[in-house]
């Protein structure tokens, strides 16, 4: 029999129902796996084995008495990115400024997962305040890519992606502001879904750029991603930007046929800068979808050339405002013996934030400051409209768009840390979904000769998560890629 | 080139300080990023409205009714404060 920690959520669920194993046995298997591999992968900032085992025993007891009903996520071991607050469990967002932060409340997504009976094993590493594309900007340590420990897992949800790839958890939550779920999913060979802006509550997500941030699942299969999304999606009165629209049944959606669907290939995404292996793998996967009865047409997203600039004006502008809350008064690090209040603010922030966070606060403050506002922030906000219109036009012709998630294969640790602009450019295919608020999914579509995964991205109109999962599920079945046991 | 004084002014607005060595490194990357942003000026935005919220029109995000509901207890609200006295945040003296 496959070891417990290599089973999918559906298999774990069925095994629990058949009483092949208890929740406690599942918890022990995954905690054992973390002990075995996490000193090498370093996906977790915090793991709480005693609490997890206590929760697991409590769940077994409640299942026996019928106090807890058996939902899809009951007894399923999950992890949360460390920028999602959890009452009584330290939450740092990968930042020294929140080194000892113990949240007095839990994020809505954490509450929903707990009430569905999921086991939260711990908190995963991320770039500080989710600002980065490699998880190397964490104040604590860099996470490794389980496929090749010398490479980055992507970012900023690199810990969540690596934990799923290394079978340390069955699935995890990440957050995506410009690709932070999809890019690490691509680099770690797992499924990652950024939902429509407003589909999942942001209450309790430590804010980076509030008009772009969205929480979503990372999982081993599309069905697993669908189950996690089902549990967290839906309106929340605590988040005024959460959508009141009804949530689809994603498990029904993924079972539907893809025959007759129209796929659009954005021609601007296949130009210079795209790695040849990534390109050929994505094109080969598109042919497989054609074989399944989808039609394929080339479409144009003419404002793609402005994507990175627009994003790196808008996101830091919002971040500079959001991160003003770290004033060393209410919570967070305070520098010792300040001269006065002003000195306390400046020294605490300068010592507490890492270089990339400071850089983005500076960029954001600059583009919002008087004299530069019109040329940068207002201009970028107008280009944001053009980018959203590009998508709206494309979706008049096609049902979904398909392309690469990243321009390159996972890069080596340290390769881009000295050059922030190069790091930003690796987000070229992901940032526009956030600017337009549309849902987008990354899934593995090939494994290269060097044994690295290639990510394929599927994008759809607002609230069409079910459609993305349906196309992804069909391709997943068609490709039949085997997930290797990682790290080797 | 962004003048150093301008960078210092932005740092001041951001409530951040940089050592002279950090500043030198920072200015180099900052300039490179601003140069990259330059091509935004060529985007055809004549008559285009800015977007600040991608889904305002479609998602339906109604205001909740303004009802009283319990909030964090005072002790919980200050539980992460670097310094507190009698359930209040303590800061360096502001008024002479």
Image (cartoon, rainbow, N blue to C red):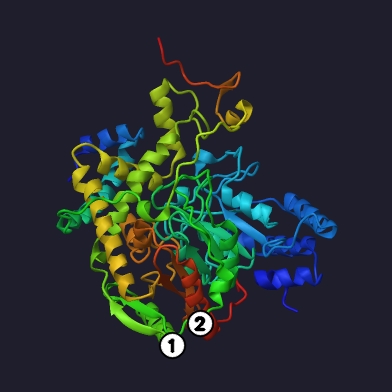
Work out which residue is located at the far front of the displayed protein and give it.
B65
Q: Is residue B66 left or right of residue A35?
A: left
User: The N terminus of chain A appears in which quarter of the rendering?
Assistant: bottom right
Where does residue B85 sit, x and y in percent of width and height?
59, 19
Q: Position of residue A34 (x, y in %)?
A: 67, 61
In terms of image quadrants, where is residue A407? bottom left
The residue beneath circle 1 is A293
Residue tagged by mark 2? A257
In the foreground, A353 or A76? A76
C-alpha gap between disc 1 and disc 2 = 9 Å
Residue A229 location (% of width, % of height): 56, 62
Q: Looking at the rendering, in which quadrant would you find the C terminus of chain A?
A: bottom right
Disc ID at residue A140: none
Label 1 vs 2, first from the N-terminus: 2
Whether callout 1 and callout 2 share a subunit is answered yes
Residue A93 in the figure: left or right of residue A5:
left
Q: State yes or no: discs 1 and 2 in contact (Cβ < 8 Å).
A: yes
Q: 10 Å neighbourhood of mark 1: few (<14), some, or many (≥20)?
A: some
- Residue A167 at x, y percent in the picture: 63, 68
Q: Which residue is situated farthest in the top direction here? A: B96
What is the tally of numbered marks visible in this picture? 2
Residue A363 is drawn in which quadrant? Answer: top left
């Amino acid at each position: 029999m496959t070891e417990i920690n290599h089973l999918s959520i559906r298999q774990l669920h069925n095994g629990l129902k058949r009483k092949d194993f208890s929740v406690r046995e599942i918890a022990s298997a995954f905690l054992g796996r973390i002990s075995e591999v996490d000193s090498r992968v370093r996906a977790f900032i915090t793991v709480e084995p005693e609490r997890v085992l206590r929760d697991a025993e409590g769940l077994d007891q409640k299942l026996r008495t019928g106090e807890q009903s058996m939902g899809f996520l009951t007894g399923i071991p999950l992890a949360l990115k460390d920028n999602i607050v959890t009452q009584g469990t330290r939450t740092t967002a990968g930042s020294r400024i929140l080194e000892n932060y113990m949240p007095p409340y839990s994020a809505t997504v954490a509450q929903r997962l707990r009430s569905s009976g999921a086991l939260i094993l711990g908190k995963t590493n991320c770039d500080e305040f989710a600002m980065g594309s490699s998880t190397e900007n964490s104040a604590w340590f860099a996470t490794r890519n389980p496929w090749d420990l010398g490479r980055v897992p992507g970012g900023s949800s690199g810990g969540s992606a690596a934990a799923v790839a290394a079978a340390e958890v069955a699935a995890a939550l990440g957050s995506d502001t410009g690709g932070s779920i999809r890019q690490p999913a691509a680099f770690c060979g797992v499924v990652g879904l950024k939902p429509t802006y407003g589909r999942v509550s942001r209450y309790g997500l430590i804010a980076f750029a509030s008009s772009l941030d969205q929480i979503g699942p990372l999982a081993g299969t599309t069905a697993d991603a669908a189950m996690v999304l089902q549990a967290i999606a839906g309106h929340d009165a605590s988040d005024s930007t959460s959508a009141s629209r009804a949530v689809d049944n994603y498990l029904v959606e993924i079972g539907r046929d893809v025959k007759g669907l129209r796929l659009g290939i954005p021609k601007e995404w296949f130009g210079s800068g795209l790695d040849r292996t990534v390109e050929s793998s994505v094109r080969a996967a598109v042919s497989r979808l054609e074989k399944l009865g989808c039609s394929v047409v080339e479409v144009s997203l003419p404002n793609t050339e402005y994507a990175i600039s627009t994003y790196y004006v808008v996101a830091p502008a919002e971040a500079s405002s959001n991160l003003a809350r770290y004033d060393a008064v209410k919570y967070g690090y305070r520098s010792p013996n300040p001269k006065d209040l002003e000195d306390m603010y400046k020294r605490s922030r300068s010592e507490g934030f890492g270089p990339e966070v400071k850089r983005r606060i500076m960029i954001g403050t600059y583009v919002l400051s008087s004299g530069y506002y019109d040329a940068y922030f207002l201009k970028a906000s107008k280009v944001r409209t053009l980018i959203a219109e590009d998508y709206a036009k494309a979706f008049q012709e096609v049902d979904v768009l398909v392309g690469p998630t990243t321009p390159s294969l996972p890069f080596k640790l340290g390769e881009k840390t000295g050059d922030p602009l190069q790091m930003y450019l690796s987000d070229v295919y992901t940032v526009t979904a956030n600017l337009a608020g549309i849902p987008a999914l990354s899934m593995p579509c090939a494994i290269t000769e060097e044994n690295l995964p290639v990510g394929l991205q599927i994008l759809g109109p607002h609230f069409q998560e079910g459609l993305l999962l349906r196309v992804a599920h069909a391709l997943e079945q068609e490709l039949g890629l085997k997930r290797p046991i990682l790290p080797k | 080139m962004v003048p150093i004084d301008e960078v210092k002014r932005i740092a001041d607005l951001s409530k951040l300080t940089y050592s002279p060595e950090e500043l030198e490194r920072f200015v180099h990357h900052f300039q490179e990023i601003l140069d990259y942003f330059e091509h935004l000026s060529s985007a055809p935005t004549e008559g285009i409205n800015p977007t600040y919220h991608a889904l305002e029109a479609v998602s339906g995000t109604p205001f909740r009714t303004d009802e009283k509901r319990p909030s964090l207890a005072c002790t919980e609200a200050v539980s992460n404060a670097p310094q507190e006295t009698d359930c209040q945040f303590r800061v360096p003296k502001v008024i002479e």
